[in-house]
Amino acid sequence: MDRPLLFGQRALVTGSTSGIGLAIARTLLEAGAEVFVHGLVDAVEQERLERDLRLIGPAHFVAGDLSDASAIDGMMAQCGALDILVNNAGIQHTAALADMPAAMWDRILAINLSAVFHTMRLAMPAMAQRGYGRVINIASVHGLVASVNKAPYVAAKHGLLGLTKVAALEYASAGSRQSGGVTANCICPGWVETPLIQPQIDARAAACGGDREAGVRALLSEKQPSLRMSLPEDIAALVLFLCRPEAHNLNGAALPVDGAWTAQ
Ligand code: NAD
């Protein structure tokens, strides 16, 4: 029998206790990787997640509040040398620029951007030494275009695209086609059905007399021409493709999964 695609590879997926990150963790486990699962949940939930995911493959929970740079050092040390780093954790807060609390700006920039700089600077040298590594940053369409009321989120996601391009350039020549090379890419989803966007759906549903379906349609019709949300599993499938050996020259890209949002 053939070995699974990611057999012997070690992956960290930040923010994998729910939504897109959880789907990515499952997909990488199914493909044979050892996966460090991470997020802000209590000990009971950590155990439950580990137990569920171990039915698929070797999963370990690793803690670390990404708003605290020193916690990131400890988290990365616990994971050891990584083959795959998926920076997925992120938060959102919507408010007009003038009403955005300054502390919220700092928090979103810390979690959605600075934390990614820290995990990358700690993980990528060992990837280069081994000639294989995949850094996959879950950005957003908001790394490519803006929307109102999302100043820190849009700024952080645009910054994430720039950071990823720098890493792609610096590590482009590491390894070989045989070893798989070291790449850094961003995935830029439009609307994906997860807890993160629930407050925005709730607000639209309320404006539509409590009709959730009508609220979702109203949200999508503004920007996402497909009028369909993506599922977390759709994003996970693209992550898996980026881990494949054939993706060794797919580097420094920002890949939209947005139902043609950014084609407009
Ligand atoms: P989610 O809210 O379901 O999950 C977020 C994860 O991040 C959770 O595991 C949470 O514990 C973790 N997290 C949050 N703050 C943290 C902190 N301080 N330290 C450690 N972990 C923390 O969100 P999601 O919708 O799955 O989003 C995942 C990523 O995808 C985010 O970066 C988000 O910006 C991006 N994204 C989501 C959508 C969407 O429509 N859902 C669209 C585009 C981009």
Image (cartoon, grey):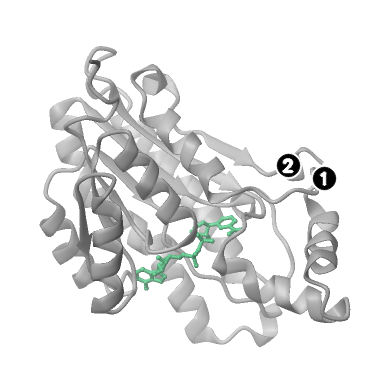
Q: 46 or 117: which is nearer to us? A: 46
Characterize the local packing of mark 2: few (<14), some (14-19) or many (20 or more) Cα atoms within 10 angstroms.
some
Task: Judge: label 2 CB < 8 Å from ligand 1.
Answer: no
Tag 2: amino acid = Gly
Look at the numbered disc 1 and give the secondary structure of its residue.
loop
Please name the residue shown 60% across and 48% down the image. Answer: 189
Q: What is the x, y in percent for residue 96?
A: 71, 79
Q: Where 17 sits versus 94, above or below?
A: above
Q: What is the x, y in percent for residue 13?
A: 33, 52
Mark number displayed over residue 43: none
Q: Quadrant of the C terminus?
A: top right
**On the picture, is 70 further left or further right than 241?**
left
Mark number displayed over residue 259: 2
Q: Where 151 sits versus 223, above or below?
A: below
Q: Where 145 sits versus 263, above or below?
A: below
Residues marked 2 and 1 touching at CB (< 8 Å): yes
Q: What is the x, y in percent for residue 193?
A: 62, 58
Q: Quadrant of residue 71?
A: bottom left
